[in-house]
Image (tube, grey):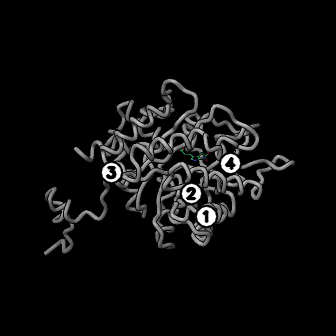
Amino acid sequence: MFPVERPRRLRRTPALRRLVAETSIAPGDLVAPLFVAEGRDEPRPLDALPGHVQHTVASLRAEVDHLHRVGVGGVILFGVPARKDERGTGAYDPDGIVQVALRALRDDVGDEMVVMADLCLDEYLVHGHCGVLAADGSVDNDATLPLYGATAVAQAAAGAAVVAPSGMMDGQVGAIRRALDDAGFDQTVVMAYSAKYASALYGPFREAVDVAIADGGDRRGYQQDWRNRREALREVRADVAEGADIVMVKPALTYLDVLADVRQAVDVPVAAYQVSGEYAMVMAAGANGWIDTDAVALEQLTAIKRAGADFVLTYFAGRVAERLQG
Ligand code: PBG
């Protein structure tokens, strides 16, 4: 008999295909990034992130309630402060916008859904870098760490179950873990953006949080070079050694090789972030009628899980969860 191998047998019916599927995706595997702005009366739509807005605290609460009802696993908050300064004060002020939002969500959803806070200073600093500057204008790694620690404590105190350092400073996970433990927050989870690349795919996000890096600067001095693969494992291992509970690879689709490597290298859960530019590309092609937006979103998110992610941060979270629920 020829051919001997007949893999098509297992593809004959939808029931067979479902039974032998190696990967699946559910609403609970998705985390929705959300933006909340200080001092705004109305939500502001974001051109480059169709379907997303800078929320008021009230509209944020309504959105989180909806995401909870469609089964989304978690949300991650980004703050847009009314004022920026040289020390990023708004990030760790107990009345900073993210802390206000976290307290509201703690009242609304408690621990029924995982409420996360992105932990960085770029939205709060006048120059838009992820850390404070040294006298020579460079980003001062070690002077930034205590401010990250203070931010983690403020976020935990306001009700964040997970804090997610995204600034790519060396030693940030250890500094945050120590600050949290010292303040009595030993149950607060640290999800590290461990392998975060200096990607051109963050463009729409910068509009969403009103961040422009001063003097045409970039983040290549602290985020990873996208020519590198092995270097990601060095970052991931360091974060796990410093106490990261979850590690992340970001962006997602252009880094599936890195994601697969990381999955092999560590035993902690691995997250992936399908970033703003990845979402915008799919939405733009879909709006032109060139691709089927929902089909492509589901295919990409499933591929990200197949490569090794346990869960995915994605601007498609709400939309895909609605479809998966039927
Ligand atoms: C930094 C941060 C960024 C994103 C998440 N956290 C932007 C950056 O590093 O410049 C990007 C997320 C996205 O593009 O969706 N606070």
In this view, 202 is above or below 44? below
User: What whole-number distance in Å separates the C-alpha atoms at marks 3 and 1?
Assistant: 29 Å
Q: Residues within 10 Å of mark 2 (few under 14, many from 20)?
A: many
Return the residue found at the far top: 41
Q: Earlier in the sequence, mark 3 or mark 2?
A: 3
The residue tagged with tag 3: helix, strand or loop? helix
**Mark 2 beta carbon near ligand 1 (under 8 Å):** yes
Q: Residues within 10 Å of mark 4 (few under 14, many from 20)?
A: many
Residue that badge 1 annotates: 177
Q: Earlier in the sequence, mark 2 or mark 4?
A: 4
Which mark's residue is nearer the viewer, 1 or 2?
1
The residue tagged with tag 2: helix, strand or loop? strand
From the viewer's perspective, is 172 left or right of 24?
A: right
Image quadrant holding the N terminus, namely bottom left
Residue that badge 3 annotates: 27
Residue that badge 2 annotates: 193
Residue that badge 4 annotates: 130
Which residue is at a point 16% across and 62% down the rendered structure image? Answer: 16
Residue 78 position, x and y percent, is: 55, 42
Mark 2 residue type: Tyr
**Mark 4 beta carbon near ligand 1 (under 8 Å):** yes
Q: Nearer the viewer, residue 71 or 25?
A: 71
User: What whole-number distance in Å separates the C-alpha atoms at marks 1 and 4?
Assistant: 19 Å
From the viewer's perspective, is 206 left or right of 289?
A: right
